[in-house]
Amino acid sequence: MVSSTNPEYDAIVIGAGHNGLAAAATLARKGLRVVVLEQSAQIGGMSRTSEISEGVRASRIAHLLYNLNPVVAKELGIGSASSPLATRVIPTVTLSPDGRHVVIRDGTPAYADGSAHPEAATYAALRSRLHKFAQLLGRLSTMSPPDLSGGLSSMSGLKELGALAALGLDAKRLGKKDMREFMRIILSNANDVLLDELEDGPLAGSLAADAVRGSCSGPRSPGTVFSLMYRLAQGGDVALPIEGMGAVADAFAKAARHYGVKINTRTSVEKIIIEHDRARGVVLQDGSTITAKTVMSSIGAFQSMMLTGAEHFDAEAVRRLRNIRHKGTAAKVNLVLKDVPVFAGLQPDQRAGRLLVAPSVTYVERAFNPVKYGDMSTHPVIEAVIPGLADPALSEAGAHVMSAIVQYVPHTLNGGWTGEAREKLVRLTIDSLEQYAPGLGSLVAHADALTPADIEAETGAPGGHWHHGEMSFDQLLTVRPVNRLSRYNFGVGGLYLCGASAHPGGDVTGAAGRNSALQAIKDGVAS
């Protein structure tokens, strides 16, 4: 029996990824006593800067910052003197087999040689429209999902209706034409929406790649337009964090510590303690216990249930949690290079951009096909950066790292992830990039490859999925992670989800952690 009369903390947060740290900082700035428990030696989850080879550091998994929520950043002071974070906006360069590469800066595309792109105006209008729709949905990203379970007679129900009514009013302000377009495309697939307006080439391919980044879906999959809007929620700018993605995690950690949060690494949670249907603390791997009024978990929903014990959930909840779709299909390959590769058709400064291998929507869809059957795509979609070109601190050892996210690599590969299979992944990555950078293979001094299975093992991300679960309509808002467990409270009193498996989902936004903490405070369990 654990003493709950004098708990050590007001809240325990499991996992020191950016969402866990955001939750901890949000609670602590309200005056609560908070401790964060991280099983690995390094904070950050997928946002880590690590040594790839001797003396060479790089963002080991995630490498770019897309969607940091401005509300979260402002509330926690991310980027302030107490929690500094320096970033550099970089262009997107969509590589083309014919050498007519497309460079997108500030939402405007042009060819790499500086000549105008014939679809520039159409692209800009489409992207602007999608961003406008994303902003409409963005109202929901910093609030708990609606709860009308109490009916219209309850005050909570009326408050939820008020928030939804405000969303409806914003939608009405779009005007009839945009409103009809919003309703037409919100459930559509990216393939149809993009090719209705753009030719099937590198420009459309870049949007298709963003619509499926990190997911087990292709451009023709339903709901991929929503995924694209999500990616464009903060305008679609791509930022390279100076000193790597570890700097992002450090900024969240400094914000948390600024408010008094204690962060313990190398501290693995074995079990969440439940007494009288309430979370009372955790048992650590060494057998010791830490008590608290509230436990918040930033790991996956299913993993959180297993730490708690399935016996504390009803049978339907267990069934739904077991069936969350979280098949990771994005691998990470880091190539340590002896020199900077030359890309035919690119100016030297353009090599410092986000390099995409997604020459058409059709290419992206075909790349998706093999992973459905447990095979690697032989022509993968790749997002690559050479961070040392924009951040000299990451090339101090005299070597550059080409950081590549390789899309459509299965978590469970046919035949297993043998040494030969890993070598094949590295070779496919090099071969795909070498079509645009001849001689790249001869520059590779070392390769560090992480499959989705490796990412799951290292970070705890369920299925190695970058968003802890598909960002599809059957796993969003009131059904994220599953129906009846969508408002952060995780089935047991005092237990909350605060990671990417909760609303609003993945990317480095911090919103899930912040929202969860505010909901816990509203519920009165953490005060």
Image (spheres, rainbow, N blue to C red):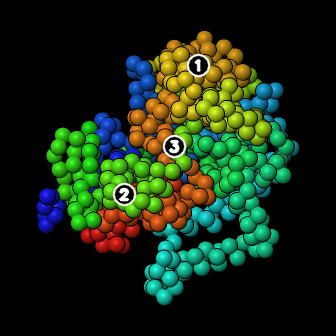
Q: Which of 144 and 370 is in front in this view?
A: 370
Of residues 476 and 26, the one drawn nearer to the viewer in this rendering: 476
Q: Around disc 1, counting alpha carbons within 10 Å, would you say few (fewer than 14), some (14 to 19), or many (20 or more)?
A: some
Q: Is 159 situated above or below 120? A: below
Q: Which of marks 2 and 1 is nearer the N terminus?
A: 2
Other residues around mark 2 within 10 Å, as few (<14) / some (14–19) / many (≥20): many
At x 71%, y 23%, the residue is 436
Q: Quarter holding the C terminus?
A: bottom left
**Percent coordinates x, y for residue 59 in the rendering:** 47, 33
Which circle, 2 or 1, is nearer the viewer? 1
Dot label at residue 466: 3
Q: Which residue is drawn at 56% across and 68% down?
A: 139
Which element is circle 2 on?
helix
Residue 187 x/y as whole percent: 70, 59
Relative image position of residue 439 (x, y in whole percent): 66, 14
Look at mark 2 in the image and give the residue it sits on. 23
* Measured Cα–Cα span from mark 2 to mark 3: 19 Å
Q: Measure how far apart labels 2 and 1 are at the Cα level.
A: 40 Å
